Image: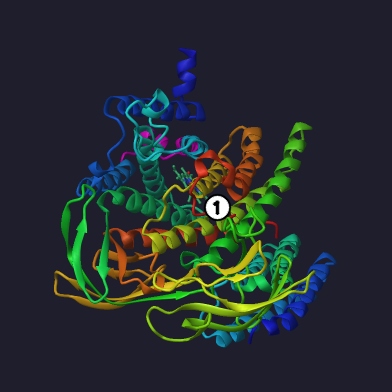
Amino acid sequence: MEEKKFIWGSPWGYRASMFTVAAMVFGGFLLQLLYGPFNFYFLHRPVNYIVGALMLILSVLSLSAKNNELAKRLSGIHLAASLMVFLLIFSLIMGLTPQMTSLPQNADLWARLGFAQVTSSWPFIIIYLATLMSLAMTVARRVKERRKGDLVFLLNHVGLWLVLAAAGLGAADMRRHVMYVQEGQMEWRVHSDDRQVMELPLAIRLDDFIMEEYPARLAIIDRKTGAAQPPGRPELYQFDPEKSKTSLLDWDIQILDYHYQAVPAGAGAYQYSNMPASTQAVQVIAQNHHSKIIRLGWLSPGNSLLPPSTLFLDDKFALVMAQAEAKRFVSKIKVFAQSGQETEAEVEVNSPLRVGDWLIYQYGYDNRAGRMSTYSSFELIYDPWLYPVYAGLILWALGALGLIVQGKPGRGKIE
Amino acid sequence: MTWAHFNWLAPPAIILWFLASLMVMRRKNKLADMFMIGGILIFAVFIVGFWIGVQRPPMRTMGETRLWHSFFLSAAGFLAYKRWKYSWLLVFSSLLASVFAIINMLKPEMHSIALMPALQSYYFVPHVTAYMLSYSILAVGTIASLIQLKKINSGKPDFNLYAFLDNIIYIGLGFLMLGLITGAAWAKEAWGHYWSWDPKETWAFITAAAYLIYIHLRLREANRKITLLMLPLAFVLLMITWLGTSFLPSASGSVHVYS
Ligand code: HEM
């Protein structure tokens, strides 16, 4: 009896809170063993609306019950810290052990308890939901109590709640598809996960695909094996049109001429050309530090139509131009929505296009063809929760600024 | 302006920052402010001139992003110093800012090292600078926590030190969360999801959770020692996030692993 009183007695301490959260986790393990991993799709609209609304309604209701012990406990710091401790433990497991996207047939107990897929395991989901609930109730209580430091507290907790609710529960409503569009053509079909052709409520016409490359890098390779030198930690030289001298291994290299777009002009030389099949080319002069031998010639990485061009330095090594890396790739597209809305835009990495609740991301292109790619691919993401999440992120960021500017209120002022 | 001008503008800025650090240590605060602002202004002028010179936002190469790191570290460090009057904040941030400026002067060939398209974003610089500031501030918090632990062991905790600790952890966690938030917004813009539990992201979450536990434990009476021990522990987790994720078995194929 003594022990029991200590655990459940008032004030509700850390021991009781940890015990409660541990019980939730234990229940989660049972559900996990019975039903397997949590299927996130279960939360899709309207379930997530209902869950979120219930949380808000319950938190508000908890205020009217005066001096309600349970409400106090659920919104208290002890439960909050205990939830955080368990979140920390679960994320540590995630950080230390490999996570899988799907379980093999003969999964061991560890995996079947959900540790190999923590984010879709019942215990984790339960802690996540409990954290959301605890946050909502804490905010409600603080709004009612009105205390010093309220603003920064509210920015952080309301912001975090919005982010966790809209990005977490909202994830159940998201859909992603990859669409491939040929230049000059219109496309509205994608493949679903089970390889069926699906039609989307959006069509994309690819008007132009532009790819810019960095100047291709120079390297010395072994003529026999093709390995870049020195082996293991190859030295690559990216020249910069402003500075055209360098040394690679035992060779001084000077750039005499460089074309971003060039075609072979006979006798191993290259000349400028804006033909679609053009490639990068550079004319170099290389001199060996020791033997003072001089080599002169053109280098080019080539492409799917033009062969590469290399410069033999001696009977062991050759100077080559590596495949150029993408600097940016842009698709000029026109999007036709079912509503009749038409949008023209340039889509590139880090700059998606938003049409209604759809986001269109530049996804890829024909890697082997590089800038000659005749198609571009897009990832289309249906995400009706964008604004709530961004609103939450902004509030939370303001809260973070509040912590920086204000420090810990009440105590600890050094002035 | 081009990089050639940088070699003329950066040394005076670095010298000004160095003088500011000297002055603040000698409590000549007015002079420190002037020197610090002078250095920041020189960087601002160069960035504007360089932006006009290259005719695009200068965020495409490693050299260009280091330029912003210098600028933001010195500016944010200075503002934080003005607010909190901790002179080491100014010294730390001008030191970090100078390191990036010096790398840019000594290694000109690294200016043009290419950034892959996903890294070319307005979020890159605030994301990385917020984390760098938070790491250095939390390092100071860790040292203070070790001192306090020692004092508790000898039976006399220092209450002023507690106040300092709490403030410093609030500030450091503030920057840590700004890094996390800009990271989430950036990931959404680049890949369409805010958080994908990539190993670096998982460990960033772990680190933030550990500091959050500390600040919440400090709100009500809790075991003093356990609470304080959260800080060295959190810093170990932070170091794993920063340096260790490349070596973890769970980290193969992370976008955050740089060779
Ligand atoms: C972004 C993450 C978070 C930050 C930055 C944060 C920050 C803070 C701060 C600074 C306080 C003290 C407020 C004051 O009295 O001035 C506080 C209080 C509190 N926080 Fe958090 N917190 C976060 C997440 C959470 C979460 C996830 C929970 C719940 C699981 C939570 C529950 C609480 C509770 C219960 C209090 C005490 C409120 C009271 O009794 O007045 N916090 N938090």
The type of colouring in the image is rainbow
State whether residue A311 is above or below residue A386: below
Number of numbered discs:
1
Query: Is residue B136 within the magenta segment?
Result: no
Q: Amino acid at mark 1?
A: Val
Residue A22 lies, in percent from the top left, at: 43, 27
Q: Quadrant of residue B213?
A: top right
Query: Is residue A81 within the magenta segment?
Result: yes
Asked whether residue B42 is in view, the answer is: yes
Q: In terms of secondary structure, where does tag 1 sit?
A: loop
**Residue of label 1:** B257
Q: Which residues are magenta?
A: A65-85
Chain assignment, label 1: B
Residue A70 in the figure: left or right of residue B129: left
State whether residue A97 is above or below residue B137: above
Residue A188 in the figure: left or right of residue A37: left
State whether residue A367 is above or below residue A57: below
